[in-house]
Image: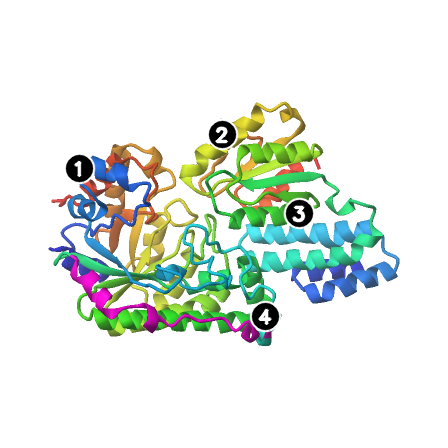
């Protein structure tokens, strides 16, 4: 097993305490840092996401994998070009106004971050103004991802997407939505660019939306 | 049949005149429109007139900082977690930074003593208010897995379950002990007057289990079983709540002795009545099933009635008809609730 394969395996099974050492060994052997990131970590997390999607593993296993990746990235970061870990660009994520639920949103944020995006998490019960303000502060944002868990906050999701659709920067961003009661049909109806039904698919969708 | 006879027959999957029905626990925002529609002044009156077979009693809990048993633990050790409006599972709890059992013990968490904060007299008084023939259901909740998640912060807790399980067991054991003591006080004070308790832990998402069946067996079932055994020792049935798709966990709950699974989140993966009937017919009873994610807020009364009829066809007994989440939201038209009860309370020839 190559060192990069070893890193990938440790990320996949969530061995945070061992992955840093393996990354260092891979660097010492002269492996390309960017390749360690892409093949040892981002690809490993894609495998994790796929297993999660197929109910082969569950949330805890996915979380320990993401934590292991973070530990690996800490060791790798000084060897990467500045900003290389969020190389796919910025993504703003939030649960919409009136909705306090964040477990699903947090999982989505984690998987998208693990897929190579820089995630700006605005938390829960986020107003449309705050989302737009965040974009203005981060005009290089590529995607805005919004979540609603309650049927009673689906109108707030509609309003948030509507506010983005009317904004002068709409053509610069993609909008993706999700949450338990949300469907592809509803996403289409409110004018979002994409919908996904789980965290792993959200990472795939984010890649698709930016053509990665 | 009166409500209690109907409930017991439903739980034991014996013939019923019509299914038992439960309105659930509508959110405060949903109550005014329901009361207006039924021309009553308050939720208690509403439950009397709508056809509800249940009378739910919250376990009375009053500590210096908190007045709800489901928020009894001050996980941030600053009084804020007992604010039921703003508490969360995901923020870091007081055990968030712990790396081993010694760290957990060093937090020196002030575990609350239910004997100080549950008044047996108040338990009796609340239960005595119940109409004679209704099913009295003690709402203990006892969400020990969710409490444990809040104690660490959910993500940290879930990772610890895999990487440092003994820390999680330590906290969970203390929480389970608290709920066991609380339940004993309640059942002892109301002996013979309570027919059911509701306990539970959310372990499902829309598409499947959040944690593996193995972790459910290790962290959720043992505590649940202790509570179930205690309730059964008083002749009290146990309704077990978990949102989401929990098909894979139901066999574990059956083995633990659960009498009724609630709320059958109808649109979650595999939670449709056909699949539940196919997999678990005759092994356990259910409560819920009338979808709250689309049908009740967006459907017509005719569609709601048709769904209830379909549910009754799948489950001529063994099903308490109820919304698929107890916390009805204000976007559910009261006419749909009326349609639910009208169809559920019909005596079919």
Q: Is residue B347 left or right of residue B323?
A: left
Q: Nearer the viewer, mark 2 or mark 3?
A: 2
Residue A2 in sight in this render: no
Query: Which numbered circle lies on residue B164?
Result: 4
Q: Chain of mark 1?
A: B
| Residue that numbered label 2 is attached to | A159
State the CA–CA distance, disc 3 to disc 4: 25 Å
State the CA–CA distance, disc 4 to disc 2: 43 Å
Report the front residue among B200 and B312: B200
Local crowd size for mark 2, using a 10 Å CA cut-off: few (<14), some (14–19), many (≥20) = some
Q: Nearer the viewer, mark 3 or mark 1?
A: 1
Disc 4 element: loop
The reply to whether callout 4 and callout 1 are in contact (CB within 8 Å) is no
Q: Are marks 3 and 1 on the same chain?
A: no
| Dot 2 or dot 3, earlier in sequence | 3
Q: Position of residue A208 (x, y in %)?
A: 65, 36
Disc 1 element: loop
The reply to whether callout 4 and callout 2 are in contact (CB within 8 Å) is no
| Residue plotted at (40% across, 65% down) | B252
| Residue plotted at (54% across, 37% down) | A177
- Residue B55 lies in the magenta stretch: no
The magenta-colored residue range is B103-130
For the C terminus of chain B, the image quarter is top left
| Residue that numbered label 1 is attached to | B39
Disc 2 element: helix
């Amino acid at each position: 097993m190559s060192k990069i394969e070893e890193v990938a395996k440790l990320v996949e099974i969530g061995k945070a305490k061992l992955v840093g050492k393996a990354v260092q060994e891979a660097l010492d052997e002269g492996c390309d840092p960017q390749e360690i990131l892409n093949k040892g970590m981002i690809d490993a997390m894609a495998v994790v996401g796929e297993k999660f999607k197929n109910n082969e593993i569950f949330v805890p296993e996915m979380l320990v994998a993401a934590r292991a990746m973070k530990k690996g990235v800490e060791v790798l970061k000084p060897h990467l070009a500045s900003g290389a870990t969020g190389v796919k660009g910025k993504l703003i994520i939030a649960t919409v106004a009136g909705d306090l639920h964040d477990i699903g949103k947090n999982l989505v944020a984690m998987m998208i971050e693990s897929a190579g995006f820089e995630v700006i998490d605005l938390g829960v019960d986020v107003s449309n103004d705050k989302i737009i303000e965040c974009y203005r502060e981060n005009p290089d944002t590529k995607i805005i991802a919004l979540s609603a868990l309650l049927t009673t906050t689906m109108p707030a999701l509609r309003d948030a997407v509507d506010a983005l659709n009317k904004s002068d920067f709409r053509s610069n961003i993609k909008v993706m939505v999700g949450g338990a009661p949300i469907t592809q049909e509803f996403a289409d109806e409110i004018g979002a660019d994409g919908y996904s039904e789980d965290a792993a698919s959200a990472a795939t969708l984010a890649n698709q939306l930016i053509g990665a | 049949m009166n409500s209690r006879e109907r409930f017991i027959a439903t739980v034991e999957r014996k013939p019923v005149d019509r299914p038992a029905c439960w309105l659930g626990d509508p959110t405060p925002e949903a109550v005014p429109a329901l009361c207006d529609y039924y021309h009553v002044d308050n939720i208690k009156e509403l439950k009397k007139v709508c056809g509800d077979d249940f009378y739910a009693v919250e376990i009375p809990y009053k500590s210096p900082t908190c007045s709800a048993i489901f928020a009894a633990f001050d996980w941030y050790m600053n009084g804020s977690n007992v604010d039921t409006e703003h508490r969360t599972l995901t923020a870091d709890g007081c055990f968030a930074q712990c790396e081993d059992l010694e760290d957990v013990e060093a937090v020196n968490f002030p575990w609350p003593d239910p004997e100080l904060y549950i008044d047996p007299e108040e338990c009796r008084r609340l239960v005595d208010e119940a109409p004679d023939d209704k099913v009295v259901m003690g709402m203990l909740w006892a969400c020990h897995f969710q409490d444990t998640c809040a104690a660490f912060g959910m993500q940290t807790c879930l990772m610890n379950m895999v990487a440092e399980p003994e820390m999680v067991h330590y906290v969970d054991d203390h929480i389970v002990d608290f709920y066991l003591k609380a339940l004993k006080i309640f059942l002892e004070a109301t002996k013979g007057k309570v027919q059911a308790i509701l306990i539970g832990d959310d372990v499902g998402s829309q598409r499947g289990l959040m944690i593996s069946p193995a972790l459910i067996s290790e962290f959720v079932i043992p505590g649940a079983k202790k509570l179930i055994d205690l309730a059964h020792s008083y002749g009290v049935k146990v309704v077990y709540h978990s949102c989401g798709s929990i098909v894979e966990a139901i066999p574990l709950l059956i083995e633990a002795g659960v009498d009724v699974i609630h709320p059958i989140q109808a649109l979650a993966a595999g939670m449709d009545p056909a699949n539940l009937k196919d997999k678990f017919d005759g092994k356990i009873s259910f409560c819920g099933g009338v979808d709250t994610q689309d049908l009740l807020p967006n459907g017509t009364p005719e569609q709601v009635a048709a769904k209830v009829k379909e549910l009754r066809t799948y489950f001529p007994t063994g099903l308490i008809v109820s919304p698929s989440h107890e916390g009805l939201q204000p976007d559910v038209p009261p006419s749909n609730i009326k349609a639910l009860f009208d169809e559920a309370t019909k005596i079919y020839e």
